[in-house]
Each structure stands twice: as C-alpha cells, then as structure tokens.
Image (tube, coloured by chain):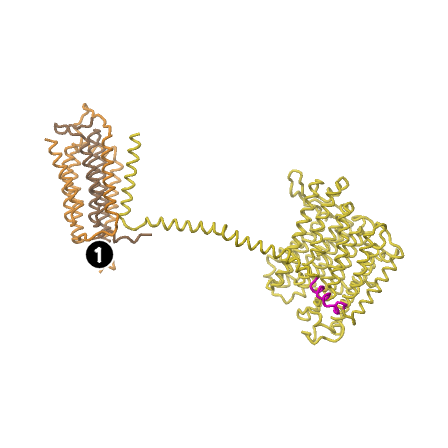
Amino acid sequence: MTNQTLALLILLFPVAGAILLAGRGWRLPRIFTVIIGPGVVWASFVCVLALFSGKAHGDFTYWSWIKSGSLDVPFNLLIDNLSIFMCLVITGVGGLIVTYSVGYMEREDDPSYARFFVYMDIFIFSMLLLVLAGNFIFLIVGWAMVGLSSYLLIGFWYQRHSAVVAARKAFVMNVIGDVGMILGTLVLFVNLHAITYAGVFKAVPHTDNGNLELAACLLLVGAVAKSAQLPLHTWLPDAMEGPTPVSALIHAATMVTAGVYLVGRMYPIYDVAVYAHGAVAIIGAVTALFAATIAIVQTDIKRVLAYSTMSQIGYMFLAVGIGAYAAGFFHLLSHAFFKALLFMAAGNVIHAMHDEQDMRKYGGLWGQMRPTSISFLVGSLSLVGVIPFVGFFSKEQVLGLAFSKPNDSLALIVWIIGAATALITGFYTGRMWWMSFWGKPSPQRPVEHPHAPGLVMMVPVGILAVLATVGGLLQTRAFGSFGPSLVNDFLAPAVGPLRWEGDWSEVVIGLSTMVLATALFLAAMRIRPWTAYVPWAQRLLERKYYFDEIYDAAFVRPMDAVAGFALRGIEEPVIDAAVVDTGLLARAGAASLSLTQSGYFRNYVLVFVGGAVVAAVILLLRASS
Amino acid sequence: MSTLNIGGSQIDTSWFLLLSAVLFILGTTGVLVRRNPLVILISIELMMNAANLALVAFSRQLQNMDGQLFALMSMTVAAAEAVVGLAILVDIFRTRDAEDVDDLSELRG
Amino acid sequence: MAIAVFFVAAAMAVLGGIGVISFHQPIRSVLSLVVVMLALSVEFLLLSAQFVFAVQIIVYAGAVMVLFLFVIALLGPARELGRGRLRFQAWLSGLFVLVLLGLMWAMLQGVQYRQPDSKADMSLFGTVQAIGVGLFTTYLYPFELTSILLLVAAIGAIYLSRKRIDDL
C-alpha cells in the first residue's frame, strides 16, 4: 500500500460513506448508519496514522484534469507535515465528534438520521480535500464544498425558519470569501503562471511585490470569511442554530480554522507581502478582543462558545500574522481539543435539558451531572489558559512570541490586545461555568433530574478531556526553554522553524497573565460584568456592536430593493409578458382563424371557387406575358 | 385552325368549349346557391357532364382516343360518387326533412 | 345541317341547365338534368364519339338519374323554403361565377389549336373497336381500378344505408 494510494484513500472513505448512506442508508436499519457514518471517518484516521508513522512526504499527481494553453491543472495531493497535521486533527477530532453525534441525534427519525451523517461525511471529505489539495483550484473546490456542507448542516432542521435564515447567511458570507479566493488565485496565475503550490512557491521570489500583496489580500478575504473574523463574522453566532455536534466540528475544530491553514500554507507569499501579513495579525487581535467582550453578556451557552471560538481564532490569526506559524497551528490543535470538548459537554447538558440552551435556566448541574461537569471544567480551564492544561501552553506560546518578537512594534501592540483578551476570556468563561454548573438549580429548569448521557456521548468527551489535560506535554517549550516541542519540530519542514526565541521575561508575563485570568474566572462567581451597571454599554454588547444592523441597512435592504425592482420592473412586465403574450397571441390568432371554420358547406365551396378564380387569373397572366 | 369537319360542315371547336364552360358555370352556381342537398348533388353531376363534353371535344380536335376513354372513366367515377353521396344523404336525412344543407353545420369553430 | 343540330342541342342543354338550378322542386331539377344529358349525348355524336353517346344515354341518363329519382321517392318531396342563413353567399357566388365565366372566355380566346391531320385515318375514330383497343391495352390498369372503385362504392352504399337498431 503505497503512500500515494493511502493519500487517495483518506479522501475516498468519507465520500464512499456519504454515497452509501445517501443511496441506501435511510432505508436500512439504523445500525448501518451508526457503523458507516463514523466508521469511514475512523478509516480515514487510520490511513492518516499510517502516513504519519511512515513519515510520508510527497506531491502525488493522480491525473491531469485541465490542460488548456498555459493552464495545467492536475488532481494532485500534497503530503507534507502540515497537511498530515491538519488531517490528524480533522479525522481524529472529527471522528470523536461524529461518534458522539450517534448518541446526540438519536431522537431524529431514520431518514433524517442518515441525512445527518451523509452531510457530516461530505463535510469531512471537503475539509480533507481542502488541506490535502496540491494546487489552488482544488483548494477552492474544497473551500466551496466546506461552505456548502456548513450550509446543509446549519439548516439541518430546515423546518425551523431561524435555522434556514442562519444557513443562508453563513453561505452568503462564505461566498464573499470564495470570490476573494478565486480572484487571489487569478492574480497569482496571471503573474506567476503557475497553479500548483510547488509552481507558485518557486516563482514567488521572482515576482513583483505589488502583485503578491494584492493576491495575499484577496486570499485573506477568503480566510476572514471562512474563519469568521471581523468584518465577515456575523454568521458564526447564528450558525449555532445547527445541532451541537455540527457546532463542535465545523464551527470550532475544523472549518473555521481553514483560514489559519490558508495563511500558514501560503507563508512564502505572506513573508514577502508584509502589509497583508500585518493585516492578518491586526484582524486577528481586534477580533479576539471584540468577540471576548460580546461573550460577557450572552445568555445562550452555545453563543458564548461561538464568540469564544471567534476570539480564539483571532489568537491563531495573530500568531500566523506575526510569523509564528507553528505557534498558530499548535493553538489550532489545542483549541480543537478543548473547544470540541466544551461543545460536546454542553451538548450533553442540552440533550439532558431537552434542548434548553439558556444558561439562566440551568444551575446546580455539578451535583447531578458529575462527569460532564468535570469535563466542562477541564475545557474551561484550558480555555482560560491555566496550567497544566493544553490551553495554557498554546496561548502563552502565542502571546510570548508576540511579546518577544524583536524589532516589531506591531507585534507588541497585538500582544497588548491579546493579553487584555486573555483576561476577559477568564471572566466570561467563569461566568459561563458558575451560572450553569454551580449554585442552586434555577426554578425555571425544564428537567428536574437530568439523565446521564449514554456511553457513546460520554466516551468521546472523556477522551477529549484527557487530551486537553495532557496535550500540553507535546510542547512545554512554550513555557521556558526546557521540555519537548514536538509540534514546532514536526511542522518545521512545512512552515519553517521558529524564527526567534523568547526569554525569561516571557515566562513571567505568561504566568502573570494566567494568574490574572484565573482571578477573573473565580471572581465571575460573584461579580456581574461592569456593563450591567452601564445600560448603553450593555445594549451595545447585546446587539453585537450593531454589526448586524449596519450590514442589514448597508447591504441587505439595498439588495432587496434591487431584487424587488428586478422582479416587478423587469421580470414580470418584460420577460413574463413576452412569454405569456406569445401564448396569448397564438391563442388569439387561432381564435380569429377558427372563424373561417363556419361549419357551412356552402361557405367552403365558395372559398373553393374563389381559389379557382385566383388560379385562373394567374394562369392567364402567365400565358399572356 | 380549330374547325372540325362535322357532317360536311365546318364547326369551330371553341363553340363546344364555350358550351362546356357555360354548363360548368351553371353547375357551380347551383352548388353555391341552392340549399337542397339533392339539388346540390345534381349540380355536381351537371359540372361533370360539362367536363366530359370538353374532353370529347378535344379528343376530336386532337384526333386522339384518350379523351373519350377519359370521359368514360369520368362517367364511371361520377356514378360511383353519386351512389355513395346519395347513400350518405339518405342516411342523414332519414329522420329529418331534407330541406336545408345549412342545418348540417356542427363541425364549426 | 350539322350546325343547326349543334345549336338546337346546345340551346336545350343550356335551358336544361338553367332549369336544374332554378326549380324549387327537386323532381323537376332531376328531369331537367336528364334533358341536359340527352342534349349532350347528341353533341357527343356530332363529335364522332359513338360509344360515348350510347353510354351517356344508357348508363348516365338511364341508371344514375334513375337512382336520383329513387332517392327522391324515398325522401319525399322537399321544398326549399325561405331565405338562407348565409348573408353574403348569394351575391358573392354570383360575382365569382361571372368572373369565372369571363376568365374562361378569355382563355378560350388564346388557345392555339393544333392543325388536324387531314390525311389521318379517321374511319375507326370513336368506334367500339377503338374504345376496346384503348381500354384493354393501354389503359387496362385504370380500367381494372375503376371496377374496384365501383365495388367499393357499392359496399359503401350498402353499409351507409343499413337499418339502424335505434330506428323507429
């Protein structure tokens, strides 16, 4: 079994699963869906492990897809450490989540149940294609398909109007990103005359900076849309309309990290395009702070986690934006662990509370759902960045490298923003924890004695809790210069080694940030956010800084007007009328012609004779001429 | 020259053709104007006779037997057509008065 | 002498034709048509068509017209009453037929007749012999087809005039 075959198999397993389930699955007993749905993801995982352990490396071309003039697009997969890393996350964490959803979605009827796993398998395939693609075209194909899967899954409960609206919103914003991606690819192709990664990266040093900046900015638009960063972020909170496993997989662990992957993969371009590169860092930092402030006032547990995701991805953007690529990817991995954990544990709670998501109606779950509460606590502490959980190591590496980057004032600025965000993160996470799990049960609780989640829902959560706890051991390098740094070393062949080192000041700063954040975490048990005392601030945060309203007024209403005009001014009077009038004309013509069918025999003979007269006249004229 | 030597005298072929034309016109008028279905059929017979006359006249002019043979065939066909036409007439007007062919105007529109 | 015969017969034919289309009683129309046919048979004879003359009288006037008479007897004397329903039919028809007549007359003016060959053998022209030769050699096929045609007509007539079950 060659590496080339293995690589292709990684993609083929989920596709096969989706086709099988879509074709036959919903008619067969549920056990088939249960085995095939998650099973194909685990099969992919096994293939990835095989490649990982075999230290596979290569650019495998399977066939030539388009060959037209100077455009030569092959179907090729690039296997290097970065793509293997991403595949491990996608198939590993994805596998856990898909397995978890076997239990979470059990209340659906058989066709919907199968439909869910079809969509999940399509998503896994699309995401794998995105990270494995070896050229821009298939990157875009995977990119767009991921957006499609997101749409299908957010709107899974399509009978709900709010879900449909949210799915549409997500899709439209993703398409804006897709346009950026395509334009960026075009700029690269026109100037560098290459479409594969190998070709493009080889040509980068010989290209004009201006073109690279333009391409980098356009690609960034795509990354920003997909990763829900400012200003294309409004779709992510609404995407929580989808089932909780969807939120865990797509909107925490994988799809939204595609933007980070993009910047990391394109690092040769971004190293040269310094303005675009700086923009990445700024966008990331600002989004991180922005999202954290909004998270303080949310009452829906999934919304808190959504804004938290937005904020943490901001950290990843920050990291890759200042050139610390490996740090960004380590945070991606750690975030995948603890955010998926948080979402799934929240899912346990939601499932037990019969789909109630308002935290104010929870309370006191620590006593009644002990394993879930412990897992949630592990995830929360990881999010806040407390030793020894993995979140501490990854977040402190990012912030530490930002702080200690030599000769870069931008890095310092984003460090300040990032540190402030860390403190706020501590607060909103604490608020979420105390409100849901501590204290007395709220009188508005829908269920008095929540049932414990089944094994299939608890085991993946448990596994992720363990990973979140010990994952830090992968890279304690972040915290001082001793200990392993497996992730950095692993990714070095793909994204380059760590460009600069931190020193002891980094350790101090890191620990102090952690202490302050933890303090705020504990304080949240008693203290309400300051905005509770300042109504206009509260309203500002609750309305998410009025972004939705601004977009609605600036884009949605004008487009509605244009569409309305197109319908009433053009479509109906002109096009419809042309079609309908043709029909009416034919009918009128037929009606008037049918008058000649009078039914009277003598009329017909008269016409006969008239025709004879005409014929005679013609004959005479011809004879005489 | 169009004259024929008939019984010692010279008669112009055109006279025969003119007679044929007049009879044909009379028959056409009958078909167009009369409303009794039987009279219409008779008028059609008149038209066919007029055509036979023209055929035989030309046969004599061109000294070719084909015209007369054609006239014979024409008579046969006329007979067959009259038979079938009358049978249809009888069938339609068995139960009602055979007065007005305009009554049969249901195939309209 | 022949000219006189011609004109007498022609006059009878025209008068008969007018009678065909003018009489209100169909029986009189039929009898007028018989007159026309007899007049035309004389014309045929003038044109040396002996066999056609005989067939015209025997078959046409003698059989087909008798058929018409039988139908009149079957259907009873129906008189055409009142004015027709079609408004323009009458004068429009008159216009058309007059135009047609004029056109025919115009056409007649321009006919270029072929010179009759005075040396040709006209002894057998129009005789039974000549008819027989034509019918059974050159035009055998049409001859046989007309016999099938008559068969078809006979079957059709029998079928169309069968007794209906719902007839009272």
Q: Position of residue A4 (x, y in %)?
A: 72, 47
Task: Give the color of chain C as drawn.
Answer: orange
SS label for mark 1: loop
Local packing at callout 1 (Cα closer than 10 Å; few below 14, some 14-19, many 20+) is few
Q: Which chain is brown?
A: B
Q: Per the image, is A187 magenta?
A: no
Q: Decide whether the magenta segment is chiefly helix, strand or loop.
A: helix
Kindly identify which chain the residue marked by label 1 belongs to. Answer: B
Q: Quadrant of residue A213?
A: top right
Q: Is residue A535 magenta?
A: yes
Image: A195 above or below A430 = above
Amino acid tagged 1: Arg
User: In the image, what residue occupies the spot 29% across and 36% down?
Assistant: A617
Q: Position of residue C69 (x, y in %)?
A: 16, 48
Residue with the most extreme left position: C1
Residue name at image x 71 percent, y 71 percent = A360
Is any atom of residue A590 visible in this view?
yes
Q: Which residues fall within the magenta stretch? A: A529-544
- Image quadrant where one finds the C terminus of chain A: top left
Q: Residue furthest top?
A: C119
Chain drawn yellow, letter?
A
Q: Position of residue A108 (x, y in %)?
A: 62, 65
Residue occupying the far right of the picture: A504
Residue A515 in the image: state x and y as whole percent: 84, 64
Q: Does residue C120 appear to the left or right of A376 in the view shown? A: left
Q: Residue under label 1, please give it.
A: B96
Question: Does residue A457 appear anywhere in the picture?
Answer: no
